[in-house]
Image (cartoon, rainbow, N blue to C red):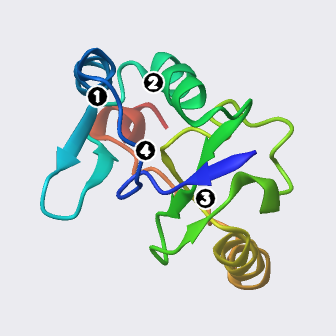
Amino acid sequence: MLTLNKNSFTLPRVEKSQFINLLRLGLEYDRTQNTYRISNYNNTKKLIDALSSILNEEKICFLQKCNICNKYFPCSSCKYAESCTTKDLPFECVCQNCLKKVTNCDSKSAPKPKKEKTPKTKIQQKLM
């Protein structure tokens, strides 16, 4: 299994037709750094298939970016990896450390919501 960062990864030199196909599938090429990055997520399955054939890898996955701390992490480190529908795709998620912090904070300091009394309207007051 090969893990790539969706913002910057390198590929071996490819033929012109393969290069055009990669661009159509949603990659951008940075000529100054000779790197690729994903700019469009509409064809991620086809893109992964194309990358796996170019790199001769059976399984390609992408690092996830944590929405809270902005760190990159692999899906394999997550305890929800088996039930996740976006596993190994180049999207954003919440890392285990931030998930633990959020669940600990919620369970310790979450006050129970109070039921608010609704004010009686004039019609209800007259009927009583």
Bin the neighbour count of mark 3 within 10 Å (Cα to Cα): few under 14, some 14-19, many 20 and up: few
Residue 74: mark: none
**Element marked by disc 1:** loop
Quadrant occupied by the N terminus: top right
Q: Earlier in the sequence, mark 2 or mark 1?
A: 1
Give the residue at mark 3: 115
CB under 8 Å between discs 4 and 2 = no
Q: Nearer the viewer, mark 4 or mark 2?
A: 4
Q: Earlier in the sequence, mark 1 or mark 3?
A: 1
Q: Is there CB contact under 8 Å for labels 2 and 1?
A: yes
Q: Earlier in the sequence, mark 4 or mark 2?
A: 4
Q: Amino acid at mark 3?
A: Lys
Q: Position of residue 35 (x, y in %)?
A: 29, 55
Pointer 4 residue:
12
Residue identified by numbered label 1? 26
| Secondary structure type for disc 2 | helix
Residue at image x 86%, y 38%? 82
Residue density around tag 1, few if under 14, some if 14–19, many if 20 or more, within 10 Å: some
Disc number lying in front (1 or 3):
1
Give me the C-alpha separation between circle 2 and circle 3.
Answer: 51 Å
Amino acid carrying mark 4 in the image: Pro
Left or right of residue 104, residue 9 in this image = left
- Amino acid identity at mark 1: Gly
Q: Is residue 20 left or right of residue 58?
A: left
Which residue is located at x 64 percent, y 38 percent?
A: 60
Label 1 vs label 4, nearer the camera: 4
Residue that badge 2 annotates: 47
Mark 1 vs mark 4: which is more N-terminal? 4
The CA distance from mark 1 to mark 3 is: 50 Å
Placement of 16 over or under 97, stated as above or below? above
Q: Decide which of tag 2 and tag 3 comes sooner along the chain.
A: 2
User: Dot 4: what SS?
Assistant: loop
